Image (cartoon, grey):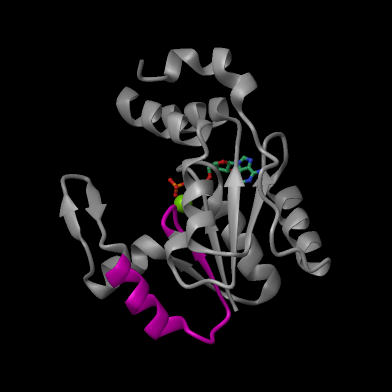
Amino acid sequence: MIIAVTGTPGVGKTTVSKLLAEKLGYEYVNLRDYALEKGLGEMKGEELELDVDELAENFERDFKNKNVIVDSHLAHYMPADLVIVLRAHPKLIAERLKERGYSKAKVGENVEAELVDVILVEAIEENENVVEIDTTGKTPEEVLEEILDLRRRGVKKRVGLVDWSDAYDDILPYLRL
Ligand SMILES: Nc1ncnc2c1ncn2[C@@H]1O[C@H](COP(=O)(O)OP(=O)(O)OP(=O)(O)O)[C@@H](O)[C@H]1O
Ligand SMILES: [Mg+2]
């Protein structure tokens, strides 16, 4: 089974994916590292530009029928049995990315993406089985528990529960207006 863990940069994908892989005994795959290993994509300055179709074809060849957790903001473009979209209050995203030293523009871009559900909408367009998890105010272990609980209950679709519109005034300083 392939489980994709996706979401806005800084939302906690890597942290939660590693916990989940360890708990389930699945292989952990960071999509960026995988692409680099395979010689896929092109470096444009600091950024690795990837052709998602090419990436998905390679991924399918290498991981079909394996038990894998794939971690990336592009993970929902991989052939997955389940897509987990992690969400976090846009202010948390802003603070985490600022702390990482991201530029104002890059912080703004990602805060806006979280605000308007970009990754969630992309995921829904790609896959039937999408579950959304609000990580705000939870520890990584609590998020892991929530994922395991959904799994136990056989929930394959759970979307639409996150709405950041009330956060708008709070995050105004981060938006690129
Ligand atoms: N509930 C939570 N779930 C996951 N991470 C959390 C949570 N609470 C706080 N964090 C923290 O959020 C930070 C962001 O984590 P992480 O690097 O996993 O994000 P990411 O989504 O993988 O980012 P990127 O897209 O840049 O790879 C970490 O410092 C992590 O400890
Ligand atoms: Mg990561």
Q: Is residue 171 magenta?
A: no
Q: Residue at x 50, y 26 (%)?
A: 95
| 67 or 153: nearer the viewer | 153
Q: Quadrant of ligand 1?
A: top right
In the image: residue 156, left or right of residue 52:
right
Residue 36, horizontal then vertical, whole percent: 27, 66
Quadrant (top left/top right/bottom left/bottom right) for the C terminus: top left
In the image: residue 61, left or right of residue 87:
left
| 164 or 139: nearer the viewer | 164
* Up-down relation of residue 38 to residue 107 (above or below): below
Q: Residue at x 24, y 48 (%)?
A: 47
Quadrant (top left/top right/bottom left/bottom right) for the N terminus: bottom right
Q: Is residue 65 magenta?
A: yes
* Up-down relation of residue 33 to residue 1 (above or below): above
Magenta span: 53-74
Q: Residue at x 42, y 63 (%)?
A: 77
| 143 or 22: nearer the viewer | 143
Residue 70 visible? The answer is: yes
Quadrant in which residue 92 is drawn: top right
Residue 46, horizontal then vertical, whole percent: 22, 45
Residue 101 visible? The answer is: no
In the image: residue 97, left or right of residue 49:
right
* Up-down relation of residue 169 to residue 42 (above or below): above
Residue 128, horizontal then vertical, whole percent: 59, 64
* Up-down relation of residue 56 to residue 139 (above or below): below
Q: Residue at x 76, y 49 (%)?
A: 142
